[in-house]
Image: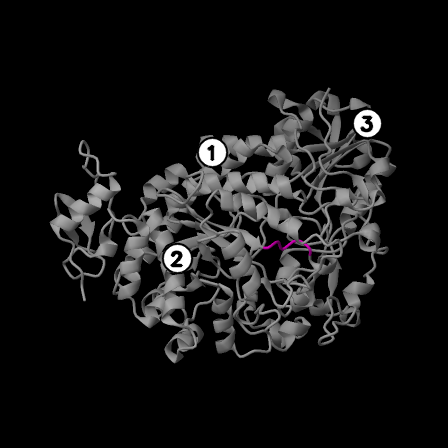
Amino acid sequence: MKTKVTKLSALIAVMILSGCSDSDTKVQQAELSQATLEIIEQSGLKFKDHNKDGELNLYEDWRLSAPERADDLVARMTDAEKAGAMMHGTLATTPDASRLVFDGEGENNTVLLKERMINTLITRQAGAVKDIADDNNTVQAIAEQTRLAIPVSISTDPRNHFNEAGGASIGAGQFSQWTETLGLAAIGDEALTKKFADIIRQEYLAVGINQALHPTADIATEPRWGRVNSTFGEDANLSRIMTKSYVQGLQNSDTDLVKGGVWGVVKHFAGGGPQENGIDAHYFIGRKQVYPGNNFAYHRIPFKGAFEAGVAGVMPYYGVPMDQVIGEENVGFGYSKYLLTDVLRGEEKFEGVIVSDWGVASDCVGPCREGVISEEYAAIPWYARLGMPWGVEDIDTVERAALLVDAGIDSFGGINDPTNLLANITSGRLTAKRINLSVKRIMVTKFKQGLFESAFVDPAKAIEVVGKAEFQVAADDSQRRSVTLLKNTGDQLPLSSTELGKVFVSGIEASFASDYGLTVVEEMNDADTIIIRTQTPGMMAHAWFPFAVWMPMGELGFVSDDDFALRDYETAPDEHNGAQLCYPELAEESLGQCQYTGGASHDLIQAAIATGKRVILDVFMIRPAALGNIAHTIDIITANYGTSDEAFLDVITNNNGAKPEGKLPFGLPVSTDLVEEFGSEDLPSNEEQAEITLFPFGYGLTYK
């Protein structure tokens, strides 16, 4: 039955929304944008006719509250539409990710939107800003052609930093490029973090992106973990402050998601940091999260900052929190009813959307559980052969979908096909009441943002907004301020271009250094100063491509390739199926290798030290680097968390007053050996044995 809003009911709605004021009952016209939808005029106001029936329905009436509109919309939806709405799919892109794909064979975006009725999708599109805006407008135009014309929530992974890791972050491209979140934590300025989030909010909305799969509130208590880079470091209370400010800037409000805001999804509840031996839960071999320090509650603290800011979405992680939930089997966070319903909904009072991490509803069989050890298997696209249903991997996929909803999941991350969920709805395994609750939460968020009124963007304006000069000035300032000075023997820094003398550079383009004003030489021995820019070493487990390659883990120190050796846990068979992280017996086959990335940097550093010249070492801390074997032999060491060559040179030369302000957001260990022997995955460095740490959390020198 269609509901028509009469002039009387509209007037009542106006009075309610205006607090029943006799002096001011006038409602300001909402800004509307559409491609093909007709406009309904009533009481001198304009509304979009989403379901194309010529009448003003409750969900089309922007004067009503988001919950009221959502109730009306959900009541109109079919089971298939509800199942589609609970998918958080992936927009199909061209092979170079420059454009979205709307036609042709296979799973194109028109199929996802019109046939599968999915209206929340992540975009990994990169390239020209105008193309991104144009393609997102096309997405919304196709959504208008569906029965109820529900606008699309278009999400993204972070895209305003330096580190690019497929499936976790996207290159900045034309967007403003800031220090990583670790750098924001190193600065420790919550107002700056809020400003950063507000700026990326403006850039996202300019191109039609309205949902952010961030910030990351995980705590980096395990330095070997490959995803430390996306966190705010190891201190839960600092992370809580930064997370709160981030969400406030992103959602355009200090306490809620409002119009002009980007839907934030904080991750990964209840803390994805304490991975056993630092092996990430993207792979079967790394599915366990462990708590030898009995510190589970500590990892929940940062999320409280997000809840205080009214975050709209929460994403649990893949990992299995081993033996942390009484009365429940060891299952991944996304399958834990206790953690998602009792704790998140109950204790934390979270009322928004719980979005599963990508692929937790998918299968993981054969090589997915063993590592990619065959050319034939590697030929299958990675996204089509990887699932992360840890703890329930042997359960039927249809029942697995029901278990996710039972636990509390509202939105299925990374799933482009609603068939399994729909089967549970039509069979009665999942009740209409439970499904309606999830769909309402999703729709309330869309209504809060004003997507039903205006989901389209102006591509010309997008070009003006994204990466504009004032945004990049602020971003450059964050890069410079975040630099952390670890050693400055004899207070040598800052050094002017003249004082640096002849300079040999590595990790900086020689031509750029020359243009900056440095006198660059080609040989170390001819230099007065040797500048080396590198990053934290790591180990890429090719058997577990792609994530173990995109997010290196393991070894934290600079050692020679000849001295590098795999650790026992890296070659130990899994007790469940015998899988290994590394397969030394397949060392000659690239798919079995575990490749250490720090050998060349070690050799370069040692060669620089041997010259007796002044050496300046700068390390991009994508994870805490272990410097115990080299720090005593180098006079000047800096840490950065995403800094351009220009910003770095500005700091060491004190150009325009630039100076290092950063304080370490995590402790730097002496060696990986000590971390392995004495460390606890769930404890921050200042709660572990002192001999593990070389430079403590919060350490950072300043210029005199």
Label 2 CA crowd tier, 10 Å (few <14, some 14–19, many 20+): many
Residue beneath the point at 41% across and 62% down: 438
What is the CA distance from the residue labelled 2 to the residue labelled 3? 57 Å
Label 3 CA crowd tier, 10 Å (few <14, some 14–19, many 20+): few
| Picture layout, residue 499 above or below residue 43 | above
Q: As rendered, which of 543 and 210 lies closer to the eye?
A: 210
Q: Which residues are magenta?
A: 270-274
Residue 161 percent across, percent down from the top left? 55, 43
Amino acid type of the residue tagged 1 in the rendering: Phe
Residue 662 percent across, percent down from the top left? 66, 32
The C terminus sits in image quarter: top right
What is the CA distance from the residue labelled 1 to the residue labelled 2? 33 Å
Q: Which mark is residue 434?
A: none
Q: Which mark is residue 471?
A: 1
Q: Left or right of 602: which side holds 62?
A: left
Amino acid type of the residue tagged 3 in the rendering: Thr
Q: Are marks 2 and 3 in contact (CB under 8 Å)?
A: no
Residue beneath the point at 62% across and 21% down: 657
Choose the circle earlier in sequence order: 2 or 3: 2
Q: Which mark is residue 441?
A: 2
Q: Left or right of 503: which side holds 35?
A: left
Residue beneath the point at 83% across and 31% down: 613
Amino acid type of the residue tagged 2 in the rendering: Arg
Which residue position is annotated with label 3?
489
The N terminus sits in image quarter: bottom left
| Picture layout, residue 285 above or below residue 244 | below
**To which quarter of the image does residue 656 belong?**
top right
